[in-house]
């Protein structure tokens, strides 16, 4: 089973991507920008969006097996990492941190992505 998750953004069809793709017991969530004036706030809101997508499709943060952060302001990467750590401190998924310069919209300081797999009990 393959299900495409869309937000209706014109970018999805223009570029050819989905907000997320669910295949069986795994969801792959595209990098997601957050809102706010600084790197920490944008990371927290992006993580909240990730959590909403997970929950809406029957997953939880505890199902995340890989998390990705791409930051445009690498001098302050620790602010994004701090927000990430507050959410994933006990879950501790595999992690990738990259430097993106710049994003399409210069107001975007971070994008967060995730892969989650439901355990079969």
Image (cartoon, rainbow, N blue to C red):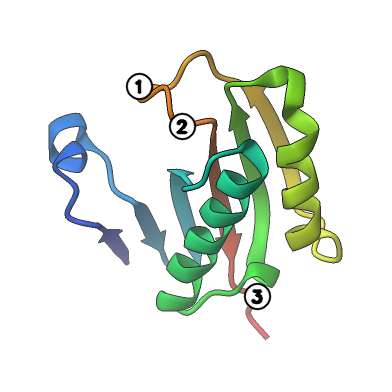
Q: Which residue corresponds to the image point at 40% horizontal and 61% vertical from the top-left?
A: 23
The residue most toward the bottom is 121
Q: Which residue is mark 2?
A: 108
Is residue 32 found left or right of 78 in the rendered image?
left
Quarter containing the C terminus: bottom right
Q: Is residue 49 positioned above or below 108 on the image?
A: below
Mark 2–mark 1 contact, CB under 8 Å? yes
Q: Which residue is mark 1?
A: 104
Q: Is residue 5 positioned above or below 42 on the image?
A: below
Q: Residues within 10 Å of mark 1 (few under 14, many from 20)?
A: few
Q: Quadrant of residue 6?
A: bottom left
The residue most toward the right is 90
Q: How far across and how far down the image is residue 39, in percent?
A: 63, 37
Mark sitting on residue 119:
3
Mark 2, secondary structure of its residue: loop
Mark 3, secondary structure of its residue: loop
Q: Nearer the viewer, residue 8 or 92?
A: 8
The residue most toward the front is 37
Which is more foreground, mark 3 or mark 1? 1
Q: Is residue 115 positioned above or below 53 on the image?
A: above
Q: Nearer the viewer, residue 78 or 18?
A: 78
């Amino acid at each position: 089973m393959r299900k495409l998750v869309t937000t209706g953004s014109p970018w999805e069809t223009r570029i050819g991507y989905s907000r997320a793709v669910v295949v069986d017991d795994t969801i792959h969530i595209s990098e997601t920008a957050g809102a706010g004036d600084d790197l920490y706030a944008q990371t927290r809101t992006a993580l909240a969006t990730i959590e909403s997508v997970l929950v809406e499709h029957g997953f939880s943060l505890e199902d995340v097996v890989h998390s990705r952060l791409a930051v445009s302001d690498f001098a302050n990467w620790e602010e994004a990492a701090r927000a990430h750590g507050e959410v994933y401190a006990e879950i501790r998924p595999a992690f990738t941190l990259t430097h993106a310069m710049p994003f399409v919209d210069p107001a975007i300081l971070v994008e967060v992505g995730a892969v989650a797999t439901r355990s079969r009990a």
